[in-house]
Image (cartoon, rainbow, N blue to C red):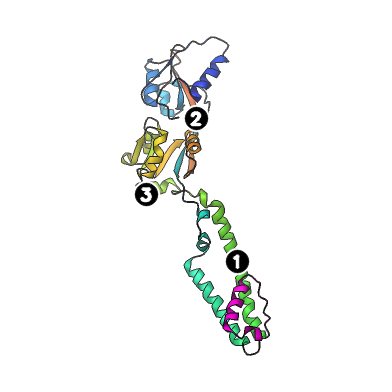
Amino acid sequence: MRNGFSVEVFEAVVKRLPYQLPYVLVPFYGSYDDMVEQVYSKGLDAEVEDTEIMAYRYQYAEFSQPYLESGLIMVVTAKPDKSKERWVFLETFTRRMWLITIAMQTFIGFVIWLIEHAENPNLTRFGAVLWFSITVLFFAHREPLRSNLSRFVLAPWLFAILIISASFTASLTSMLTISHLQPSVSDIDTLLRTNASVGCNGNSFIVGYLINVLGFKPKNIRKIDSINDYPDAFRNGDIQAAFFVVPHAKVFLAKYCKGFTMTGPTFKLGGFGFVINSYHFPYTVDFPLMNLL
């Protein structure tokens, strides 16, 4: 198919030129670097494709002004949405914190019962004291305390409950609002340290960039031909992360919006541009069929 975003940009530019520019779109089966070298060897006069402007490619050809900004970004699987878990509120505190809180609440209730049960008819039964302990958590207790000693014991605990309640509310709110954005891998250093496998378009510059710039081992790089193959690669455990140029990452996330997210820094690149042989232009213009999109 001789169409796509890059071709549409090229055709729109040609229409605005003040002179006629005859061209023929020729399909090409090969990598992006192969296409650039074809322009250099005059097998093609130009390349109309989403080609990244890279410094090492200038030894073979020249580029037009970038028509789309770009950068290298990492895409990983997202952790399950904890807001859908039934017992998510239990994760706001550690198990030790929950046990200490329950133990202290029971202990305070028992101490108040020891002080009040002889003189306070509302707290003669231990069951009433347990209910009193529960309502204290929500500041909804109605049973009056008759002993000043009971008030002295309860006052610090009410202050502690206030702090615990505020911390619980803040932690639960944070979990419900940002848990669905948590990536499974937070940074590239984690991938390098664990020798994790990563995927990328095998026909693009990304393979060399991962090896020469980011320091990945060649054996840990999985070359993936189609954007539709990434979900299966993640699902089968073949890769723990995928690297895209930003426009391609947005297309991938638009198609597979559930379960994936972008993370880590964006490595700034030169953007997408057309490859031009300044000594042999214009005649035929290449359009490759091996299009990631």
Q: Earlier in the sequence, mark 1 or mark 2?
A: 1
Q: Amino acid at mark 2?
A: Gly
- Tell which of 247 and 144 is nearer to you: 144
Q: Which residues are magenta?
A: 119-145
Whole-angstrom CA distance, mark 1 to mark 2, is 50 Å
Whether residue 213 is visible to the viewer of this picture, yes or no, is no
Classify mark 3: residues with Cα within 10 Å, few (<14), some (14-19) or many (20+). few
Q: Quadrant of residue 28?
A: top left
Q: Residue at x 49, y 21 (%)?
A: 7
| Mark 1 lies on residue | 165
Label 2 vs 3, first from the N-terminus:
3
Residue situated in front as seen by the camera: 208 or 138: 138
Question: Residue 271, which numbered label?
Answer: 2
Q: Nearer the viewer, mark 1 or mark 2?
A: 1
In the rendered image, residue 23, in percent from the top left (x then y), is placed at 47, 12
Q: Earlier in the sequence, mark 3 or mark 1?
A: 1
In this view, 38 is above or below 222: above
Q: Position of residue 287 (x, y in %)?
A: 43, 20
Give the secondary structure at mark 3: helix
Mark pair 3, 1: CA separation: 39 Å
Marks 2 and 3, how far apart in space?
Answer: 30 Å
Question: Is residue 121 shown above or below 280?
Answer: below
Position of residue 164 in the picture relative to residue 275 (left or right): right
Residue type at tag 1: Ser
Residue 185, given in percent of the width and then of the height, sits at: 43, 48
Graded by Cα atoms within 10 Å as few (under 14), some (14 to 19) or many (20 or more), the crowding at tag 2 reads many
Q: Amino acid at mark 3?
A: Arg
Q: Which residue is mark 3?
A: 193
Kindly tell me whether residue 166 is visible in this rendering: yes
